[in-house]
Image (tube, grey):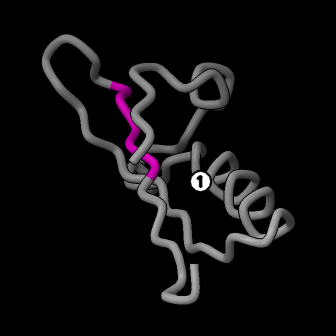
């Protein structure tokens, strides 16, 4: 897991109220997944919003490597 208290990509994107579940840091998760796959470590990377009182924009990137890794 990689934890980011205030992802940079979320600071400059406005999300409509009807899409409040959207976490734009999923873009970063795709980049991390691509780097892992490209270096021979196939993985699935997802971004999860985990707001806390101190960090309302906190995001956790969950990395699940394939069994062959």
Asked if the stretch drawn in magenta spans residue 5, the answer is no
Of 34 and 57, nearer the camera is 34
Of 63 and 14, nearer the camera is 63
Query: Quick check: 42 above or below 34?
Result: below
Q: Is residue 13 left or right of residue 40?
A: left
Q: Main secondary structure of the magenta part?
A: strand
Task: Give the image quarter of residue 36.
Answer: bottom right
Residue occupied by mark 1 = 26
Residue sitting at 37 percent across and 27 percent down? 57
Residue sitting at 55 percent across and 64 percent down? 45
Q: Is residue 4 left or right of residue 36?
A: left
Residue sitting at 34 percent across and 44 percent down? 49
Name the residue at the right extreme: 38
Residue sitting at 76 percent across and 53 percent down? 31
Q: Is residue 42 left or right of residue 4?
A: right
Of 49 and 2, nearer the camera is 2
Question: What is the crowding at mark 1: few (fewer than 14 residues within 10 Å), some, or many (at least 20)?
Answer: some
Q: Which residues are magenta?
A: 57-61
SS state under label 1: helix
Asked if the stretch drawn in magenta spans residue 59, the answer is yes
Name the residue at the top extreme: 54
Q: Is residue 24 left or right of residue 61?
A: right
């Amino acid at each position: 897991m990689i934890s980011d208290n205030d992802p940079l990509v979320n600071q400059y994107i406005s999300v409509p109220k009807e899409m409040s579940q959207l976490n734009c840091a999923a873009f970063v998760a795709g980049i991390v997944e691509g780097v892992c796959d490209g270096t021979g470590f196939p993985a699935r990377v997802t971004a999860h919003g985990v707001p806390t009182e101190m960090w309302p924009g906190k995001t956790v990137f969950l990395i699940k490597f394939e069994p062959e890794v």
